[in-house]
Image (cartoon, rainbow, N blue to C red):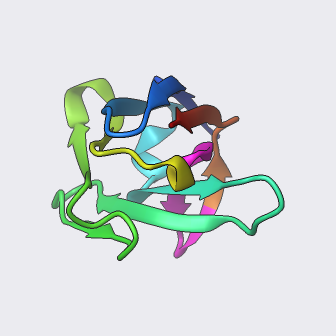
Amino acid sequence: QVELVESGGGLVQAGDSLRLSCTASGRASDINAVGWFRQAPGKEREFVGSIDWSTGSTTLAASVKGRFTISRDNARNTVYLQMNSLKIEDTAVYYCGGLSGGQYVYRGQGTQVTVSS
Protein backbone atom coordinates (compact mmCIF):
# COMPACT_ATOMS: atom_id res chain seq x y z
CA GLN A 1 0.00 0.00 0.00
CA VAL A 2 1.13 3.54 -0.78
CA GLU A 3 0.10 6.69 1.00
CA LEU A 4 0.38 10.07 -0.70
CA VAL A 5 0.27 13.30 1.25
CA GLU A 6 0.10 16.72 -0.38
CA SER A 7 1.11 19.95 1.26
CA GLY A 8 1.89 23.53 0.38
CA GLY A 9 -1.50 24.87 -0.63
CA GLY A 10 -2.79 28.22 0.48
CA LEU A 11 -4.19 31.60 -0.44
CA VAL A 12 -2.12 33.73 -2.77
CA GLN A 13 -2.64 36.66 -5.09
CA ALA A 14 -2.67 36.49 -8.85
CA GLY A 15 0.87 36.53 -10.16
CA ASP A 16 2.32 34.88 -7.06
CA SER A 17 4.06 31.54 -6.84
CA LEU A 18 3.39 28.46 -4.77
CA ARG A 19 5.06 25.09 -4.47
CA LEU A 20 3.10 21.96 -3.68
CA SER A 21 4.67 18.78 -2.39
CA CYS A 22 3.52 15.20 -2.68
CA THR A 23 5.27 12.73 -0.43
CA ALA A 24 4.90 8.99 -0.80
CA SER A 25 5.23 6.52 2.03
CA GLY A 26 4.75 2.81 2.29
CA ARG A 27 5.51 0.80 -0.83
CA ALA A 28 6.62 3.84 -2.78
CA SER A 29 8.52 1.56 -5.14
CA ASP A 30 5.14 0.46 -6.53
CA ILE A 31 4.75 3.88 -8.14
CA ASN A 32 6.02 4.37 -11.70
CA ALA A 33 4.98 7.98 -12.02
CA VAL A 34 3.24 10.74 -10.07
CA GLY A 35 0.59 12.90 -11.57
CA TRP A 36 -0.93 16.15 -10.42
CA PHE A 37 -4.62 16.82 -10.87
CA ARG A 38 -6.91 19.62 -9.85
CA GLN A 39 -10.60 20.09 -9.42
CA ALA A 40 -12.39 23.39 -9.12
CA PRO A 41 -15.92 23.67 -7.71
CA GLY A 42 -18.46 22.61 -10.28
CA LYS A 43 -15.81 21.44 -12.72
CA GLU A 44 -14.42 18.08 -13.66
CA ARG A 45 -11.05 16.95 -12.48
CA GLU A 46 -8.27 18.20 -14.73
CA PHE A 47 -4.89 16.66 -15.40
CA VAL A 48 -2.13 19.15 -14.61
CA GLY A 49 1.01 17.16 -15.29
CA SER A 50 3.09 14.16 -14.37
CA ILE A 51 6.62 13.00 -13.79
CA ASP A 52 8.19 9.63 -14.40
CA TRP A 53 9.67 8.41 -11.15
CA SER A 54 12.70 6.82 -12.77
CA THR A 55 13.61 9.13 -15.61
CA GLY A 56 12.27 12.43 -14.34
CA SER A 57 10.57 13.01 -17.65
CA THR A 58 7.62 15.39 -17.27
CA THR A 59 4.37 16.12 -19.04
CA LEU A 60 2.38 19.29 -18.51
CA ALA A 61 -1.09 20.29 -19.59
CA ALA A 62 -1.27 23.09 -22.11
CA SER A 63 -3.12 25.28 -19.60
CA VAL A 64 -0.13 25.36 -17.26
CA LYS A 65 2.82 24.88 -19.59
CA GLY A 66 5.31 27.69 -19.19
CA ARG A 67 4.05 28.50 -15.70
CA PHE A 68 4.20 25.21 -13.79
CA THR A 69 7.03 22.75 -13.47
CA ILE A 70 7.25 19.33 -11.85
CA SER A 71 10.31 17.88 -10.20
CA ARG A 72 11.15 15.06 -7.85
CA ASP A 73 13.45 14.23 -4.98
CA ASN A 74 13.88 10.48 -5.04
CA ALA A 75 15.68 10.41 -1.71
CA ARG A 76 12.68 12.04 -0.05
CA ASN A 77 10.08 10.18 -2.14
CA THR A 78 8.67 13.60 -2.90
CA VAL A 79 7.36 15.25 -6.03
CA TYR A 80 6.99 19.00 -6.32
CA LEU A 81 4.64 21.12 -8.35
CA GLN A 82 6.10 24.60 -8.74
CA MET A 83 3.40 27.02 -9.76
CA ASN A 84 4.41 30.45 -11.01
CA SER A 85 2.39 33.34 -12.38
CA LEU A 86 -0.73 31.97 -10.76
CA LYS A 87 -4.08 32.98 -12.18
CA ILE A 88 -7.49 33.12 -10.58
CA GLU A 89 -8.54 30.18 -12.74
CA ASP A 90 -5.84 28.05 -11.09
CA THR A 91 -7.97 28.00 -7.96
CA ALA A 92 -8.79 24.39 -7.17
CA VAL A 93 -8.09 21.46 -4.92
CA TYR A 94 -4.86 19.90 -6.12
CA TYR A 95 -4.29 16.18 -5.81
CA CYS A 96 -1.34 13.99 -6.56
CA GLY A 97 -1.82 10.49 -7.87
CA GLY A 98 0.47 7.48 -7.95
CA LEU A 99 0.62 5.54 -11.20
CA SER A 100 1.00 1.81 -10.84
CA GLY A 101 0.23 -0.82 -13.43
CA GLY A 102 -0.82 1.87 -15.88
CA GLN A 103 -3.47 3.41 -13.66
CA TYR A 104 -3.55 6.09 -11.01
CA VAL A 105 -4.48 3.77 -8.19
CA TYR A 106 -3.24 5.94 -5.36
CA ARG A 107 -4.40 9.45 -4.52
CA GLY A 108 -3.69 11.96 -1.80
CA GLN A 109 -6.27 13.87 0.18
CA GLY A 110 -5.71 17.08 -1.74
CA THR A 111 -4.59 20.58 -0.87
CA GLN A 112 -6.52 23.77 -1.55
CA VAL A 113 -5.01 26.46 -3.71
CA THR A 114 -6.88 29.75 -3.85
CA VAL A 115 -5.74 32.58 -6.07
CA SER A 116 -7.28 35.96 -5.44
CA SER A 117 -7.23 39.10 -7.57
41 or 116, which lies in front? 116
Magenta range: 91-104
Q: Is residue 103 magenta?
A: yes
**Residue farthest toward the front in the current orientation of the protein:** 117
Taking the image as shown, residue 103 lies to the left or right of residue 44, namely left
Q: Could you tell me if residue 32 is visible in this image?
A: no
Q: Residue at x 35, y 76 (%)?
A: 62
Q: Residue at x 63, y 51 (%)?
A: 106
82 or 76, which lies in front? 82
| Residue 41 position in % (x across, y down) | 79, 53
Q: Residue at x 65, y 59 (%)?
A: 105
Q: Could you tell me if residue 67 is visible in this image?
A: yes
Taking the image as shown, residue 105 lies to the left or right of residue 12, namely right
Q: Is residue 62 above or below residue 78?
A: below
| Residue 9 position in % (x across, y down) | 52, 27
Specify the quadrant of the image occupied by residue 4: top right
Q: Is residue 34 magenta?
A: no
| Residue 117 position in % (x across, y down) | 50, 37
| Residue 31 position in % (x across, y down) | 45, 53
